[in-house]
Image (tube, rainbow, N blue to C red):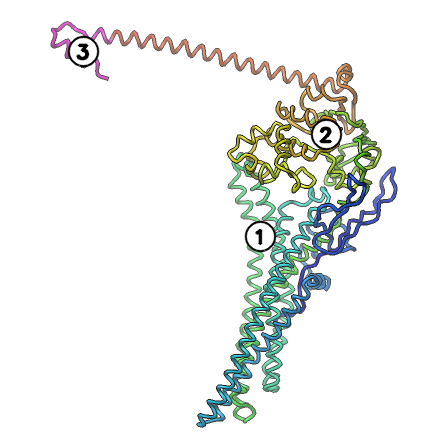
């Protein structure tokens, strides 16, 4: 018999907790504002200051929740190998906290579940009363003997009573199933929303350490396992518990001595069920981990299929994925061995119970301590208890699997981000000018602390100016943009906007006033219209005319209209169906719709893209990673990155005047490469022209020789051997 954990399992939506860590920063600032807390629920409306009135208004509701106010961040940010004991094995006991967490999920659905339990009680009572009433029918038949009139009257009344009872039981069972199903699906919905919200609110460093495939596996597979264990499984389990309890009670009511004798087999099976559940939970946890690794590999390889195809690695990747799935299969076989042994033992115990009833019941009937009806009722109750025990076994197995998958979800739900998502100071639009300053900034990526990117970097970008950033590959140009967007926090130093440390500013507000166009822009797998509208603060308020205007300014309108579906064209995963220049122009239109005060750009050398960028930069503070000389010439100043700091900074004419400067060397190298490329192109053109000329001469010579050969053959055919012979030979020569 399986260990029963009774109780309702429902959705838990945790309290919003956006408090920052008490982290010390150099040259630091006034204390952070009070923690914003929202009411428990799947969505929390976060406040922001209205630009027009200066009052606090509500943003679009955002489902960012934390599962526990007392939760702590996972050390190192990685979620791998943080659960269980040594060797990656999960604990072999069911933690009481896990049970409490699952029970707390029931609170939003407590009334529906209470009604379902009530209907469950009614349907189970009807089901378990049937053997007792059927036993009375059998006794009536045996006691009335040959009195047909009395027997007919008794049977009619009993059958009418049983029909009414069964109708009530069927209606109650239908209501139970409906309420349990709807409540269970609501639980799964809330759980998935909470997990997805918890993933999105993590800092970017978290995603550097945890692969996308693993997170997707938790959001899909783990929530499915937990949901299955607390929806259909919960309903069937509660029904099995109720029927088993009622069946055992009726067995003692009918014959206490027979019940005591038969139920002696239950304790050993119960002990076996406890140990089985512990090991099943351990294997389930390890299976989910192995499945997550397989999902990681599949997601990464499928999303980069063009690279796999270009290198011809299809077969090796299939082998790699097969190896991962073999690990899952190995664990599944261990689980199959456990399940086979357990269910074999429980099936045998059920048969032994039936045999014990027949043996002991026959002896009691022989001694006149039981009637035929009592024995029939007892036998049917034993049968129902056996079915219920089997149902409880399945319920316990699925519940242990749910605990194994749930342990992974709890760690993700409990993890707090390094800094809050929507908390901090918000400047009034009139106060935002766009002056940027990096002051003694030192930074290394969290996954590569031993390789610093910046050390004591300082850079000033006055409001309304264009700062071009140049430097060798790997010098940290793109990292400047990441720090400005506060995707990462510097290890030391301060980054300010108009004199305000960006760590004091609301990150949500900060990013809404910074527009970015990367060299490899990422588009979503939806229409071009939706991708452009994504840049607006509230995409639902964007009109088609706004989208068309942004596309025209970004030089994207013409090529979009050339598509058969125009702005409704689906761009594919990450915009794979568009060229690099087209994706960048759509990204520029998206940034235009955002209308930011500050721009961070990293664009390619395409002329139409550069023209659109120049329109986008008008009247804004711009930090652009320069790839073209024209971009540098149009900038107010140039910053040269080298050796983890700003090596040079100033107008490009001034920097070019320094013959020993790094900027001059970079420009000379670029000019040399361009000149070499032109020379190589000219040489290639010359070779092509010489080849064409040689080919034409050879072709003319071949044609001339063929003409002479044809004339010689023609003249040799006309031999003077009379008209008849000449005509005959000429006809032969004209044959092909």
Residues at marks 3 and 1, CA–CA distance in whole angstroms: 84 Å
On screen, 647 above or below 168? above
In terms of secondary structure, what is the magenta stretch mainly?
Answer: helix
Q: Nearer the viewer, residue 300 or 53?
A: 53
In terms of secondary structure, where does tag 3 sit?
helix
Q: Is residue 637 left or right of residue 160?
A: right
**Residue contact between numbered discs 2 and 1, judged by CB atoms under 8 Å:** no
* First along the sequence among labels 3 and 1: 1
On screen, 648 above or below 128? above
Q: Residue under circle 3?
A: 730
On screen, 432 above or below 122? above
Residue 87 showing in the rendered view: no
Residue 387 coordinates in the image, percent (x, y): 55, 73
Q: Tag on residue 477?
A: 2
* First along the sequence among labels 3 and 2: 2
Q: Nearer the viewer, residue 446 or 423?
A: 423
Write the residue at 56% across / 13% down. 682
Say whether residue 714 is magenta.
yes
What range is drawn magenta here? 713-736
Q: Residue under circle 1?
A: 327
Label tally? 3
Residue 665 coordinates in the image, percent (x, y): 72, 18
Q: Quadrant of the C terminus?
A: top left
Residues at marks 2 and 1, CA–CA distance in whole angstroms: 42 Å
Residue 557 coordinates in the image, percent (x, y): 59, 29
In terms of secondary structure, where does tag 1 sit?
helix
Query: Few, some or many C-alpha atoms within 10 Å of disc 2 (few <14, some 14-19, many ≥20)?
Result: many
Write the residue at 70% across / 59% down. 12
């Amino acid at each position: 018999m399986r260990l029963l954990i009774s109780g309702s399992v429902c959705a838990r939506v945790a309290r919003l907790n956006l408090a920052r860590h008490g982290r010390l920063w150099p040259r630091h600032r006034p204390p952070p504002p009070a923690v914003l807390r929202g009411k428990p629920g799947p969505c929390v409306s976060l406040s922001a200051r209205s630009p027009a009135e200066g009052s606090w208004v509500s943003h679009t509701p955002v489902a960012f929740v934390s599962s526990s106010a007392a939760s702590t961040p996972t050390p190192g940010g990685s979620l791998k190998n943080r659960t269980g004991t040594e060797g990656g094995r999960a604990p072999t006991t069911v933690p009481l906290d896990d049970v409490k967490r699952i029970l707390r999920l029931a609170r939003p659905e407590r009334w529906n579940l209470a009604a379902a339990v009530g209907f469950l009680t009614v349907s189970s009572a009807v089901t378990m009363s049937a053997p007792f009433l059927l036993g009375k029918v059998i006794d009536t038949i045996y006691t009335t003997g040959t009195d047909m009139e009395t027997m007919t009257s008794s049977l009619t009344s009993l059958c009418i009573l049983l029909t009414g009872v069964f109708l009530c039981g069927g209606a109650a069972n239908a209501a139970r199933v409906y309420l349990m199903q709807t409540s269970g699906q609501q639980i799964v919905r809330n759980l998935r929303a909470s997990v997805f919200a918890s993933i999105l609110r993590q800092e970017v460093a978290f995603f550097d350490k945890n692969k996308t495939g693993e997170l997707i596996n938790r959001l899909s597979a783990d929530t499915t396992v937990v949901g299955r264990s607390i929806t259909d499984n919960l309903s069937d389990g509660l029904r099995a518990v109720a029927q088993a309890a009622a069946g055992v009670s009726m067995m003692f009511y009918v014959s206490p001595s027979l019940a005591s004798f038969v139920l002696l087999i239950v304790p050993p099976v119960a002990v076996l069920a406890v140990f089985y559940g512990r090991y099943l939970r351990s294997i389930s946890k390890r299976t989910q981990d192995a499945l997550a690794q397989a999902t990681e590999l599949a997601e990464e390889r499928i999303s980069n299929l063009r690279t796999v195809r270009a290198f011809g690695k299809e077969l090796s990747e299939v082998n790699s994925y097969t190896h991962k799935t073999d690990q899952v299969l190995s664990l599944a076989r261990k689980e199959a061995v456990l399940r086979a042994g357990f269910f074999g033992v429980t099936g045998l115990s059920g048969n032994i119970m039936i045999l014990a009833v027949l043996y002991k019941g026959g002896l009691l009937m022989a001694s006149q301590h039981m009637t035929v009806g009592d024995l029939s009722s007892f036998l049917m109750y034993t049968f129902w208890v056996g079915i219920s025990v089997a149902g409880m076994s399945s319920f316990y197995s699925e519940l242990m699997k749910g605990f194994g998958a749930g342990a992974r979800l709890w760690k993700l739900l409990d993890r707090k981000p390094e800094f809050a998502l929507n908390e901090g100071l918000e400047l009034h639009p009139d106060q935002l000018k766009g002056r940027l300053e990096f002051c003694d900034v030192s930074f290394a990526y969290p996954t590569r602390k031993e390789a610093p990117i910046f050390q004591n970097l300082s850079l000033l970008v006055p409001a309304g100016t264009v700062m071009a950033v140049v430097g060798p590959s790997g010098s940290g140009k793109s990292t400047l943009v990441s720090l400005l967007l506060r995707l990462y926090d510097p290890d030391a130093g301060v980054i300010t906007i108009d004199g305000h440390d960006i760590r004091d500013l609301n990150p949500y507000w900060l990013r809404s006033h910074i527009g970015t166009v990367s060299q490899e822009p990422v588009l979503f797998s939806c229409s071009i219209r939706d991708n452009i509208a994504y840049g607006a603060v509230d995409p639902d308020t964007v009109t088609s005319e706004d989208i068309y205007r942004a596309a025209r300014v970004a030089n994207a309108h013409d090529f979009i209209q050339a598509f058969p579906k125009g702005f409704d064209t689906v761009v594919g995963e990450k915009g794979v169906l568009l060229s690099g220049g087209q994706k960048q122009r759509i990204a520029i239109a998206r940034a235009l719709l955002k209308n930011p005060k500050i721009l961070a750009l990293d664009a390619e050398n395409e002329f139409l893209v550069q023209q659109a960028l120049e329109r986008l930069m008008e009247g804004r503070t711009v930090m652009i990673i320069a790839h073209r000389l024209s971009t540098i010439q149009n900038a107010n100043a140039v910053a040269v990155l080298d050796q983890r700091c700003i090596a040079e900074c100033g107008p490009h004419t001034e920097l070019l005047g320094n013959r020993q400067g790094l900027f001059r060397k970079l420009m000379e190298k670029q000019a040399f490469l361009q000149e070499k490329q032109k020379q190589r192109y000219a040489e290639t053109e010359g070779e092509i022209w010489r080849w064409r000329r040689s080919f034409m001469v050879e072709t003319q010579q071949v044609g001339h020789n063929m003409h002479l050969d044809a004339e010689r053959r023609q003249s040799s055919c006309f031999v003077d051997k009379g008209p008849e012979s000449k005509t005959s030979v000429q006809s032969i020569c004209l044959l092909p």
